[in-house]
Image (cartoon, helix red, strand yellow):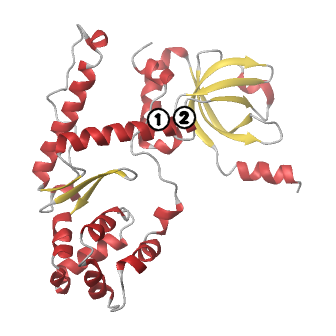
Amino acid sequence: MTAVDRETLLGWRDPVEGIFEIQRKEGDAVVLLNLVDDLEYHTYSNVGRTAFRGVSKGCFLHTCLVPVHSAGGAWLVSGAMSSYPKSSAAEIAQAALHLATSQPELVFRNPEKLEQGWQRMREDRAAFVEFCGGDELVLPPAEAEDLLNGYYRHRQEAAVAGQPDRTRGRRLPGLDLPFFELPRELAEPDTIGIIYDEVDGLNFYADYGMLRDLFAAPALAGHRQHQDLLRAYLREESIAPLPIRRLAAAHPETADAVFRKLLRKPGFTWSEHGEALLCRRKPWYYANKPRPGVSVIGDRLSALAVGR
């Protein structure tokens, strides 16, 4: 196998999934705009131009692409390809929006969108801190839900006020409707923690108040309920290192005692062993680059979503 072939095969491990709008045809290729990541792809098919017969500028394709490394900037259709007419733009926009918001990693293939995502998250976090009084809260679930709905309502009202020309004369339903509802696993505990971190974004943690009590009073480490909770925080893949880091940083004088009791390691110190513990328990977190906790929508998808 040649070096070029090897590079091509390696590139195929990372296909680009998207919903594409046809920009134009160029010989055997079509130029596609990915509505999800807002990038253009010069695309070929291994069956030649016949694959694109029957589609024209403004039509849509849903498919996956893989890079052709022997031809810089060229992409190849991989697998099934579904085509849709221009008249389906509204439905296509909704499908692309769902893909972008449910799988934001697809959006952040675009470095520009990645930076926009970080910037928007910084702005949203600053607004959250100003509205809520801090970036870490511990509340009963009902109060947390009310606070978050108040925050999202505040953000929407601010967005509407900032664009009076675009909203004048339009009916704007939903300002008084709930924006956020906690899932059952967060609605049932006595407390939940809400942390809006600069890197990890906005996250919610069940029974965070009990965990905070443990770090504030390490004698509680002898209680089975508190031990089981900390073990769950260390074990669960749905929980990043963030809450444990936060509590250890907030209680440096007691964190060592908590972990010594839990791990039965009298020589454990958080400053020396804490990060290694998290790396062992949560390798998935350290294996991935951090991404913004908000999604970013491209200009063309935004226009299609409002019927332009």
Where disc 2 sits, the SS reads helix
The residue positioned 23% from the left and 79% from the top of the image is 254
In the shown orientation, is residue 215 left or right of residue 77? left
- Mark 2 and mark 1: Cα distance apart in space: 6 Å
Check the image and name the residue furthest to the right.
2
Q: Which mark is residue 116?
A: 1
Tag 1: amino acid: Gln
x and y percentages locating residue 298 in the rendered image: 49, 27
Check the image and name the residue furthest to the top.
169
In the shown orientation, is residue 228 left or right of residue 138? right
Tell whether label 1 touches label 2 (CB within 8 Å): yes
Where disc 1 sits, the SS reads helix
Q: Quadrant of the N terminus?
A: bottom right
**Which quadrant of the structure image shows residue 209?**
bottom left
In the image, residue 32 sits, relative to residue 7, either above or below, namely above
x and y percentages locating residue 306 in the rendered image: 39, 17
Q: Which mark is residue 112?
A: 2
In the image, residue 304 sits, relative to residue 272, either above or below, namely above
In the image, residue 172 sits, relative to residue 281, either above or below, namely above
x and y percentages locating residue 272 in the rendered image: 42, 80
Q: Is residue 54 visible?
A: no
x and y percentages locating residue 285 in the rendered image: 46, 62
Q: Is residue 181 visible?
A: yes
**Which quadrant of the structure image shows residue 66?**
top right
The residue positioned 45% from the left and 30% from the top of the image is 297
In the shown orientation, is residue 235 left or right of residue 99? left
**Which quadrant of the structure image shows residue 75?**
top right
Tag 2: amino acid: Glu
Q: Quadrant of the C terminus?
A: top left
